[in-house]
Image (cartoon, rainbow, N blue to C red):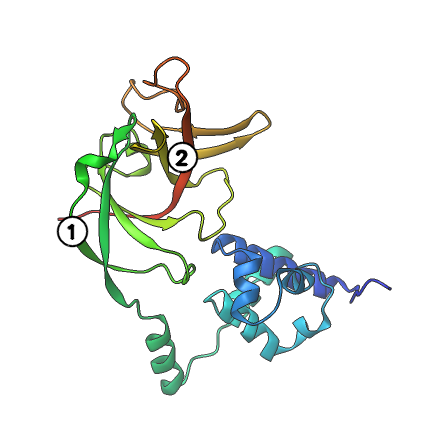
């Protein structure tokens, strides 16, 4: 079967712009495609310039809506990649302004505050267990509509270079449910299980993916926190432990 190809520089440029927009908004091809009823491979064809429908304004609107962006965002990204001035944005009609405002207005909900997470070393999670967890009004991250979302309260100063300090709430999205794969620069909530899962510990770190593997780093002005996380720190010799990324952190919230 012949490979489908549009084979024009403009199709490739629009595809590159679509991919750049998707990556900046941290949305996977699977999620983006699902939102408009196509597979990840179908979405990929647009990004590699192999789908001529990408020239259609209606298709561009459909694709960018899946990213919760606009066709104008796509065209501005295309101009940036081409080294051109961005095209002027048409003034929206009153009906469009109302529609966009309604579509983009964040809907606040009460997210549970599940745990306290240590920004430094491992912290036993059981000390924050409650029959009725506290909650805080936060807009769910719309990029992950199917994944569980919650808040964790930060303790410690090992992430203060990223402006995450003691007392902040971090907005977490379940890593398993969103199919998370480690990427350099992500902030994650890490969980360690000990004694066959009877003891649960948490910490907050930033991901670095390198040729030697995945490292989890503090980002602190405190000289105590200069080294990557030691997964078995504090564990007994020979003790079996399980460490996993529990959640992707999408925001930090400072309560006044």
The residue that disc 1 covers is 134
Find residue 231 and report its horizontal and vertical position in percent: 40, 24
The residue lying toward the viewer, choosing from 91 and 27, is: 27
Any part of residue 169 in sight: no
Find residue 187 and report its horizontal and vertical position in percent: 39, 40
The correct choice, above or below, for 80 with respect to 71 in the image is: above
The quarter of the image holding the N terminus is: bottom right
Kindly indicate the quadrant of the structure image that contains residue 52. bottom right
The residue lying toward the viewer, choosing from 59 and 36, is: 36
- For this view, does 91 lie left or right of residue 3? left
The correct choice, above or below, for 252 with respect to 206 in the image is: below
Find residue 147 and report its horizontal and vertical position in percent: 40, 57
The residue drawn where x is 33% and y is 75% is: 101
Kindly indicate the quadrant of the structure image that contains residue 63. bottom right
Residue 206's disc is: 2
Residue 38's disc is: none
């Amino acid at each position: 079967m012949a490979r489908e190809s549009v084979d024009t520089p403009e199709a490739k440029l629009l595809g590159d712009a679509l991919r750049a927009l998707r990556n900046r908004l941290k949305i996977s091809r699977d999620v983006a495609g699902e939102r408009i009823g196509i597979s990840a491979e179908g979405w990929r064809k647009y990004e590699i310039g192999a789908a001529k429908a990408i020239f259609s304004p209606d298709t561009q609107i459909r694709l960018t809506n899946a990213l919760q962006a606009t066709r104008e965002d796509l065209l501005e990204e295309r101009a940036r990649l081409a080294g051109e001035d961005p095209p002027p944005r048409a003034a929206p009609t009153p009906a469009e302004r109302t529609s966009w405002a309604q579509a983009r207005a964040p809907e606040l909900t009460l997210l549970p505050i599940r745990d306290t997470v240590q920004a430094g070393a491992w912290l036993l999670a059981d000390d924050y267990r409650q029959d009725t967890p506290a909650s805080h009004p936060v807009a769910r991250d719309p990029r992950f509509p199917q994944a569980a979302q919650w808040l964790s309260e930060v303790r410690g100063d090992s992430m203060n270079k990223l402006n995450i300090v003691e007392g902040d709430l971090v907005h977490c999205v379940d890593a398993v449910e969103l199919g998370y794969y480690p990427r350099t620069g992500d902030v994650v909530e890490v969980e360690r299980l000990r004694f066959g899962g009877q003891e649960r510990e948490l910490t907050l770190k930033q991901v670095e993916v390198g040729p030697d593997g995945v490292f989890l780093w503090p980002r602190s002005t405190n000289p105590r926190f200069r080294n990557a996380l030691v997964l078995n720190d504090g564990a007994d010799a020979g003790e079996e432990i399980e460490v996993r990324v529990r959640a992707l952190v999408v925001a930090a919230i400072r309560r006044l």
